[in-house]
Amino acid sequence: MKVEDFDFNLPEELIAQTPLEKRDASRLMVLDVPNQQFQHRTFTDIVDQLNPGDTLVFKGERCHSVEEFV
């Protein structure tokens, strides 16, 4: 795997500026590897994507805008 594999164009208007009021309503993109297809779901569907033995990693920090550090 190469770092360049994660380099893609993401327009500003598609980057969330504030969290949703109902966090579990956030969007979830699921990659169906065998069929090479994407599915658009909501985060509440994540339990349908997990299998026994899977590891789920939670990010415990908040994102901060650059202006907060200037």
Image (cartoon, grey):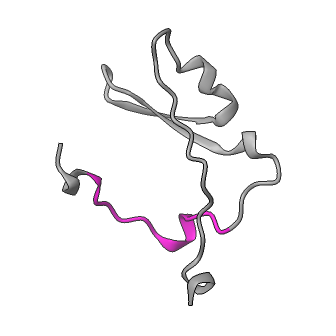
Residue drawn at the location 81% of the way across and 46% of the way down: 22
- 5 w.r.t. 10: above or below: above
Q: Which stretch appears magenta?
A: 6-17
- 32 w.r.t. 8: above or below: above
* Quadrant, the C terminus: bottom right
Residue drawn at the location 65% of the way across and 35% of the way down: 43
Residue 69 as seen in the image, left or right of residue 3:
right
Residue 49 as seen in the image, left or right of residue 34:
right
* Residue 9 picture location, percent across and down: 35, 65
Residue that sits furthest to the right in the current view: 21
- 50 w.r.t. 17: above or below: above
Residue drawn at the location 50% of the way across and 9% of the way down: 52
Residue 30 as seen in the image, left or right of residue 8:
right
Total numbered badges shown on the rendered structure = 0
Magenta region, main secondary structure: loop
* Quadrant, the N terminus: top left
Q: Is residue 7 magenta?
A: yes
- 24 w.r.t. 48: above or below: below
* Residue 36 picture location, percent across and down: 31, 29
Residue that sits furthest to the top in the current view: 52
* Residue 13 picture location, percent across and down: 56, 71
Residue drawn at the location 32% of the way across and 60% of the way down: 8
Residue toward you, 12 or 61: 61
Residue toward you, 64 or 12: 64
Residue that sits furthest to the bottom in the current view: 70
* Residue 21 picture location, percent across and down: 82, 53
